[in-house]
Amino acid sequence: MSLYQQQEIKLYNTLTRQKEVFRPLVAGKVGMYVCGPTVYQNVHLGNCRTFISFDVMYRYLKHLGYQVRYVRNITDAGHMVGDGDEGEDKVAKQARLEQVEPMEIVQQYTVGFHHVMEQFNALPPSIEPTATGHIVEQIDMTQQIVENGYGYEIDGTIYCDVNRLNELYPYGQLSGRKLEDLYSNTRELDGQDQKRNPLDFALWKKAKPEHIQKWNSPWGTGFPGWHLECSAMSQKYLGEQFDIHGGGLDLAPTHHTNEIAQSMACCGKQPAQYWLHTNMLTVNGTKMSKSLGNSFLPHELFAGSHPLLEQPYSPMTVRFFFLQAHYRSTVDFSNEALQAAEKGYRRLMAAFQLLPKLSPANSFATSSTAEDVALNALLDECYACMNDDFNTPQTIAVLFGIAAKINAYHHQQAPLGDLQSATFERLKMVFSSMIIDVLGLLDETNAADSGVTDGLMSLILEIRANARANKDWTTSDIIRNQLTALGISVKDGKEGTTWNLG
Ligand code: AMP
Ligand code: ZN
């Protein structure tokens, strides 16, 4: 019997606003779609929090033996500055500013995103589709929506008809709002005069002559609306209906609401059974965001180079910091919280490192003892916490309880011989798989090594950049030559400096 058959998971479903028992559409299989990054700038730590939260869910479902198809897209076209229908495409704008091709922007920030995810030990998704790679599917979906009577064309742009859809199902369901409330909160937006109603949104947009990323369609040259890619790609890879759809909470009121609208308009079905949303990483209570200018970048943490940081923090410290909060709570970013996380992480890993050093007892108990029952209860509790809507902070609290036991066995304050041999084996199995496989924490020594190397390299390259800015060529040459002597090659590009070993 697989682990998943023994465990009952409950998930908080934003759609119904309650915890529900998780029942996948096909027994033993899970289809999960998560909205990925828009690759026009470096991902900040808030974005990372969201992706790490879903990484843990993916890991736990896999750990339980589910066959998971995890689809996380890359938005490389169609996402406008301001997140609405009007304005400039974020990728195209960045390309214009940097005077490069949009696809150079996409490549650079996709590679950067993957690097950061690797540093945080986040597993790659099963499929990582791009918006520009699925234009045909998006045109097909738009055509179907128009055919079904839920889309209309105005001068080469196709809008989704929200009022008509609301006759089919409550359009504002995901945000818990009625259509009238949504209308009363709608701002007057540029270009909305074209639409029949302010809540209608573009499925396909006519391209202005200066627009760079555009494609031929039955309605002329244009490009897909931001929401459409996720509907088209989730349908292609997971089917019209699948199990889990995730993303940051800020996506629920518009992007996800409109994804549901598109699926309902196209095939009359709610796309996902469970909508999971991560809460925001904040700085002094304000959402961390690129546009507010209060974002911290991962490499600034690893190098400790941000002016508000008192020290560098390794990728695993940051990962642990995130997991110490429930994914549905906000987390405020501070030096104190990160320093506490660093201590906690080290304490947990110290117990993990003791585990293989525990010398098995000369003889194990042959029947149940109080110690045996207590330890088994803690091991069960790890699963109970994860089953309760992926409650990682509680899981970590229980792991600390187990760590205390491991310390006691190691220092022989509690006799290992009070355990049955199967319980001793279970302790090793559950403790290490919860830390390594499920929470995705790397062994401290390795993690510390790679974090320190990355941190030192960022620091050295920053010193070199400052030297160059001050025309201090002697210092910058010494740094480059010494790095070359160490087998580290440094490459200066338009977007900054990169380094490679060998
Ligand atoms: P974007 O690249 O802006 O489309 O965002 C990628 C993902 O990061 C989305 O799921 C957002 O909801 C999420 N996100 C953005 N800001 C934050 C934040 N401060 N805390 C947590 N998640 C965030
Ligand atoms: Zn999306």
Image (cartoon, helix red, strand yellow):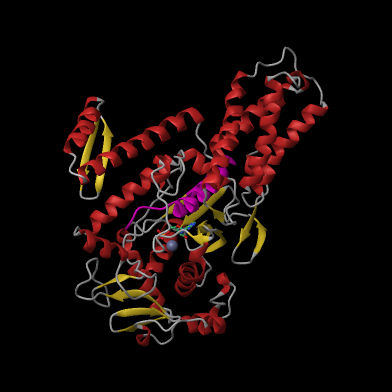
Name the image quarter holding residue 366: top right
User: Picture coordinates of residue 177 (x, y %)?
Assistant: 58, 76
Q: Residue at x 41, y 48 (%)?
A: 307
Name the image quarter holding residue 203: bottom left
Q: Main secondary structure of the magenta part?
A: helix
Q: Is residue 40 left or right of residue 160?
A: left
Q: Is residue 135 left or right of residue 117?
A: left
User: Picture coordinates of residue 10 (x, y %)?
Assistant: 66, 53
Position of 283 relative to 367 (above/below): below
Q: Is residue 360 left or right of residue 68?
A: right
Can see residue 346? yes
What number of labels is visible?
0
Whether residue 307 appears in magenta in the rendering, the answer is no
Position of 440 relative to 166 (above/below): above
**128 or 241, nearer to the observer:** 128
- Magenta extent: 40-69
**137 or 155, nearer to the observer:** 155
User: Picture coordinates of residue 173 (x, y %)?
Assistant: 57, 73
**415 or 417, nearer to the observer:** 415
User: Picture coordinates of residue 270 (x, y %)?
Assistant: 53, 68
Q: Residue at x 36, y 34 (%)?
A: 456
Can see residue 66? no
Q: Quadrant of the C terminus?
A: top left
Q: Is residue 408 left or right of residue 316?
A: right
Q: Quadrant of the N terminus?
A: top right
Residue located farthest toward the top when viewing the structure as drawn:
362
Whether residue 56 appears in magenta in the rendering, the answer is yes
**107 or 346, nearer to the observer:** 346
* Ligand 1 quadrant in view: bottom left
